[in-house]
Amino acid sequence: MTTLIASSRDYGALVQEDRVHSAIFTDEQIFQDEMERIFHRTWLFALHESEIPNFGDFKRIQLGRYPIIATRNEKGEVQLLINRCRHRGAQVCEAARGNAKRFQCWYHGWTYDTTGDLVGVTGPEAYDEDFKPEQYSLAKVARIGSYRGFVFASLAEHGMSLDEYLGPTKQYFDIMVDSSPTGELEVKPGVVNKTMYRGNWKQVGMDGYHPHYVHMSVFKIFSKRESTTGSAVGAIHLEDPFADASKSRTRGFPHGHACLDFREQRRPHGVAAIEELNHTDEGRKYVEDMVAAYGQERAQELIAWHGDPHLGIFPNLQLIHDHVRVVIPISPGETEVLMYPVFLKGVGQSINEKRLRAHEAFYGPAAAGSPDDAEIFERTQRGLLADAEPWILLGRGIRREQVDEDSSVAGCISDEITQRAQMQEWKRLMTAR
Ligand code: FES
Ligand SMILES: [Fe+2]
């Protein structure tokens, strides 16, 4: 960190209206404070309920610096238990996921149930009668909330409700969930693309300015495809959604949430998408079931949108195309990204297969979309470390912002509204007392 502003730890001064100081992407102390002030205070996405559907199902997740075991207990409740033995602090669960009614600590054998209660102490006679096992349950995440199967957690006991936190972004979750005729998604914990890149966590996603440059080679390949329905990625590039003249919008919401909103640009493709689906039995059934569930008009627009809200929920969740994306900061210059393809319940297998192939085509390890993004994030991180001129510019479109009916701040698709929304929330949380 080179400047007086940064070294004074005046984090408010690091985020201005149209620019931010690059120390927020590179500085170790700022990263540690982000863990405390952002990740340990606000709402974080934990997992989707369908990942642990049955009693005893569990999955290990990371919330800020806390390793967590997400379990489904006997009552059918999702529990988020801090993965730290109450004896001497070892991680109790090491498996990534599975089904277990008990978790036995590897160090000295203490055993916990799916609610986190301490149900077994090895050699208990060595403890006197003052020792009460019921006082040594695994600690729990302070607050849990959910919206349509998406489970969120806050490590802080007090703070705004999840309802208030998500606010007007809920209608974008609905786009993804209601692309199933039964309004249910299935996220499989073992079906995931994992990417690690040497760049800061705040770089990931929600940039409508870069695709023409970073992804041009992929778009050229996709433009030769015939299908309009299988691939949301392909569909948005049938015409140029990233031109400022397109109907696509970028939106910033309260609390750092942001969206690349392609709905208006995609809406006219609904008829063609239904026509193509009608070529197969399962496609026809999907259309019929969608119309029965939501009515002709809504079904047509949901099909046109491909279940893609293109939504970023600050700080660690993005719903992009056919997948749920979780951002896990490791250090200022290292980030893990988990991408879970979403399967629709209540549809024929071929519908989900087509979605999965579409996901793989852009985001899979052998595709060119995600690897191109990771490469540009790494190049950016190397550039940011050279901070002779430390400010980076996020002012694109600042004079053409408008407030839309849903209270979002909106502008042309390439405008840096998304980044400004995220950075203003970063500032709010980093300077809150
Ligand atoms: S640290 Fe878990 S039983 Fe000792
Ligand atoms: Fe990208």
Image (cartoon, rainbow, N blue to C red):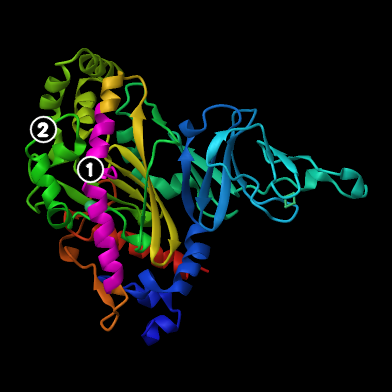
- The stretch drawn in magenta includes residue 417: no
Residue 264 image offset from top left, x and y in percent? 15, 40
C-alpha gap between disc 2 and disc 1? 23 Å
Q: Give the magenta range.
A: 354-383
Q: Is residue 324 left or right of residue 51?
A: left
Instruction: Say above or below: 402 vs 382.
Output: above
Query: Crowding near pointer 1: few (<14 within 10 Å), some, many (20+)?
Result: many
- Residue drawn at the location 12% of the way across and 46% of the way down: 219
Rate crowding at label 2 as few (under 14), some (14 to 19) or many (20 or more) other CA atoms within 10 Å. Answer: some
Secondary structure that dominates the magenta span: helix
Residue type marked 2? Pro
Query: Quadrant location of residue 349?
Result: top left
Q: Closer to the camera: disc 2 or disc 1?
A: 1
Q: Look at mark 1 in the image and give the residue it sits on.
A: 362
> What residue type is disc 1 on?
Phe
Task: Measuring from the top left, give residue 60's x and y in whole percent.
Answer: 54, 44
Q: Based on the displayed image, in which of its 4 quarters is residue 423 positioned?
A: bottom left
Asked which secondary structure carries label 2, the reply is helix
Label 2: which residue? 268
Q: Determine whether the beta carbon of the residue marked 2 sits less than 8 angstroms from the nearest atom of ligand 2.
A: no
The answer to whether any part of residue 35 appears in the image is yes
